[in-house]
Amino acid sequence: MTPEPNDLSALTARHLIAGYERGDFSPVEAARAVLERAEEAQRLTNAFVRIDGEQALAQAEAATERRRRREPLGPLDGVPVTVKDILLQAGAPTLRGSRTVRPAASAWDEDAPAVARLREQGAVFIGKTTTPEFGWKGVTDSPLTGVTRNPYDPSRTAGGSSGGSAAAVALGAAPLSIGTDGGGSVRIPASFCGIFGLKPTYGRIPLFPSSPFGTLAHAGPMTRDAADAALLLDVISGPDWRDWSQLAPAPRTAEGLAEGVKGLRIAYSPSLGGQVAVRPAVASAVRGAVGRLAELGAYIEEADPDIADPVEAFHTLWFSGAARVVQHFGAEQRELLDPGLREVCEAGARASALDYLAAVDVRMDLGRRMGRFHTAYDLLVTPTLPITAFEAGAEVPRESGHRRWTGWTPFTYPFNLTQQPAATVPCGVDEDGLPVGVQLVAPRHGDALVLRAAHALYESGLATVPSPVTS
């Protein structure tokens, strides 16, 4: 996106922080600008479950006073953020896109770990963003909130399952958002909406409650660029005792961004060895990004990882997780579910323990293969998706022949199985002006490497797309 220089809602988190420190403007002024954009984003795309204007302004006023005293709680004090409505946020019901969740049944007095870290820093919570029911698919529509639309063309999908977060960031309704990604749910909508999205190594960002989708599910930053994502990741990856599977603290990723890609060994796989049909406009834009990495000093080799499509194993694990979500639902509650979710829950309930363990075997073998691949290559580059955004309100593109959303996301879900860090960077638009994303994948624990390469693309000027439609 190309920000307007005087529009506070168009500034990155880093530029907001710098402005606060210079006294150019206050968190209250930024919050007002962002809240105005949030209302516009809601009108255009249906990105929000709720917008908390009164709360946000109260938080911004407190942050403004702390900034005035030069006593900020942390770097993000006064920075507007949004949170996907899968993650707990104290003071707001977490409805998860479902009519089966009863807001009055809980006190809603606990933050998810990532949200808690932001609150400790004094971040300003603008609102909760939309999700498909329990985050089950790669587009964002639900029986509770309806369809979330693409900011570049409201007749198209924003992608999912973090589609509300992607649309909100793209339209200036806060520079930072936290999404979740169990099979591409950060990267898919980020690619469709022309923003940056990172799925870090599993366990880097603590989660609570644990996801029913198990260790497929990651939380991740959704931002305007890689530098903001690094800033956000360094905050929300702070330890939390409630997640038994969290990783040990890592060095701050924001500090190594400027190291660039010179000398890195990068494998470029345009179609995973011919397994994926990629639209020409997407392929062309991704080739351009690969060429830019070469110009920046990376060693590029066209090479495919030795993997077969693990979709059946992914389905077993994913559908079993969905079945677990609704395991205790009665017939009346099940009737309230998205029909597609109900269908995959029924499939998951039919899987046996042996089916599940066989899928785990596939997953472990895939992890070993990718581990071996990364002994030769620092990074793998692929398209994020083989297509651009398609019609809103559909799980799969019309006449695609796909049955489920995994049919058009073959580049994303394999790296949830392997728990590797993977990011999407905007690298152009197609003939309809819809954004295209390039995916950067590193070995496990290589989050800083992904962010370095993504930042290099932003610094080179390649990772820019036109501003979305706002009228």
Image (cartoon, rainbow, N blue to C red):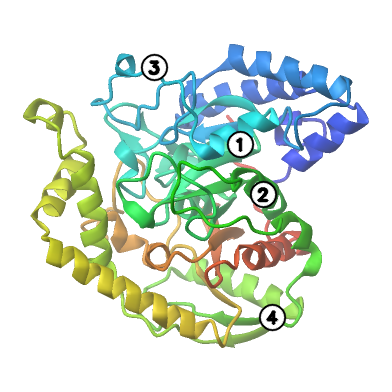
Q: Quadrant of the C terminus?
A: top right
- Quarter-of-image position of residue 24: top right
Callout 2: helix, strand or loop? Answer: helix
The circle on residue 117 is 1
Marks 1 and 2 in Cβ contact (< 8 Å): no
Residue 22: x percent and y percent?
A: 92, 31
Residue 190 visible in the snapshot = yes
The circle on residue 407 is none
Mark 3 and mark 1 lie on one chain; the one further toward the N terminus is: 3
Three-letter amino acid code of the residue under disc 3: Ala
Residue 151 visible in the snapshot = no
Disc number lying in front (4 or 1): 1
Three-letter amino acid code of the residue under disc 4: Leu
Q: Is residue 122 above or below residue 221?
A: above
Task: Determine the CA span between mark 2 and mark 3.
Answer: 29 Å
The circle on residue 107 is 3
Callout 4: helix, strand or loop? Answer: loop
Three-letter amino acid code of the residue under disc 2: Asp
- What residue is at 56 percent from the left and 71 percent from the top? 442
Q: Which residue is mark 2?
A: 234
Task: Determine the CA span between mark 4 and mark 3.
Answer: 50 Å
Q: Which residue is mark 4?
A: 264
- What residue is at 70 percent from the left and 59 percent from the top? 251
Three-letter amino acid code of the residue under disc 1: Arg
Residue 399: x percent and y percent?
A: 24, 58
